[in-house]
Image: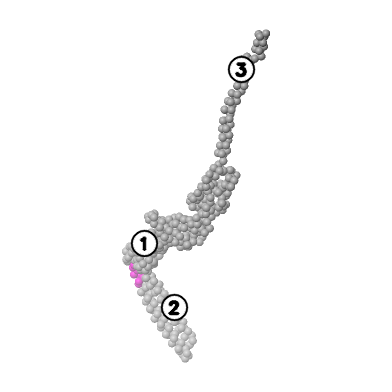
Amino acid sequence: MNQQDDQQESRAMPSPRKRRSVFAPVLIAGVVAALLAAGILPRLHAQTALTAQTASLSMQTVSVVAPRTAPSMQELLLPGAVTAFADAAIYARTSGYIEHWYADIGAHVKKGDVLATIQTPELDAQLLQARADEATAQANFDYARVTAQRWQDMLKTQSVSQQDADTKSGDMQAKRAMLQSAQANVRRLAELVSYEKITAPFDGVVTARNVDVGALVTAGGAPGLAASGGELFHVAQRDTLRVFVDVPQNDAPFISANTQAYLTVQQYPGRRFAANVARNAGAMDPTSRTLRVEVDVSNGDGALLPGAYAQVHLALENSRPALDLPVSALLFRPDGVTVATVDSAGRTQLKTVTIGRDFGTHVEVTTGLNASDRVIDNPGDAITSGETVRVSKMASAS
């Protein structure tokens, strides 16, 4: 009876091998689940982080500048040639030989000072002859005048005919005309004789002497050509000097008589020569599209020399300045100069602008931009309207 019960109990309880075969799949499933959790979850987190990082990197980060008011004053630097205020090439007005010269190059002369004398014996003789002819004409006229008066008196008493009185009057008029001709000839020759003395036309400095004692000079020469045959002296007035500059068309409207100016030259570093705008041509040069402007500078100490090269600094004033941007904010597109702005939603917008004055590192924007715009500094060449960007900072517009 007991043995039979033990056999039934043994059949009812599973063996250890059967129990291991039941728990093995569960254990394997748990291990696999653990391994999957350990490998997939970090990968999922990494993928999520990568997606977020990619989205973050795909949004461009930019710095923006705020437009500011452009400066009202702008210094315009232009090259200029220094010339004498008055410059004259002096020629002989009468022919002869140089008897003596009195002023050499570098000599300071006053108006009317004698520079040289010309010996003209033939002209002196002609003047003596003309004066003799004048005396003869004067005597003939005096005699004809007295005779005509006598015949007019006799005509009152019917002692002579009207025809004879008119003849004497006509002869007197002819003698008067001959006297006037002789007097004019004397004045002409006397004027030529006065040209025997070569004088300075104004206060200045003799810059050239092309004659010596005994040299034959002829009247006229070739006037207007410097150092040409026939030029005796060259005199330049340098107490005040003229400097001519060509102002570009864009800057020409800002030139006026009140424009401040000064000169600098290489041989005097750091020194400024005060100048003033004297006048301008009033018309643009159709070839260069520039305005010729004359700047006068006082040269009392003689530091500046005519013919020198100088740099002219002009302070141009604009009463209505526009907005100012750094040149790094500009984009050069086929449809014109463009800037990229950022709106309040962080989206870009391209605006075509018009450039005014150029200040070097920054420019004046006359149209197409508002003072409240946020302009992207150093934008990429591929930037387009509608992009979402992140603003990192507000850069300085200077």
Q: Does residue 85 lie above or below 1 as drawn?
A: below
Q: Count residues near mark 3 (Cα–Cα under 10 Å), then give few for <14, some for 14-19, many for 20+.
A: few
Q: Secondary structure at mark 1?
A: loop
Q: Is residue 397 left or right of residue 98?
A: right
In the image, 234 versus 47, the foreground residue is 47
Q: Secondary structure at mark 2?
A: helix
In the image, 44 versus 398, the foreground residue is 44
Q: Earlier in the sequence, mark 1 or mark 3?
A: 3
Q: Which residue has dot 3 on it?
A: 20
Q: Which residue has dot 2 on it?
A: 177
Residue 89 visible somewhere in the drawing: no
- Residue in the image at 54% along x and 42% along y: 61
Report the mark closest to the observer, 1 or 2.
1
Report x, y in % for residue 343.
58, 47
Q: In the rendered image, which quarter is residue 385 located in?
A: top right
Q: Earlier in the sequence, mark 1 or mark 2?
A: 2
Residue 118 shown in magenta: yes
How is the model colour-coded? one colour
Q: Is residue 304 left or right of residue 248?
A: left
Please tell me the numbered disc located at residue 301: 1
- Residue in the image at 38% along x and 72% along y: 190
The kind of residue tagged 2 is Ala
Residue span colored magenta: 117-125
Q: In the rendered image, which quarter is residue 184 located in?
A: bottom left
In the image, 45 versus 194, the foreground residue is 45
Callouts 2 and 3 close, C-beta under 8 Å: no
Q: In the rendered image, which quarter is residue 55 located in?
A: top right
Report x, y in % for residue 186.
39, 74
Residue 42 visible somewhere in the drawing: yes
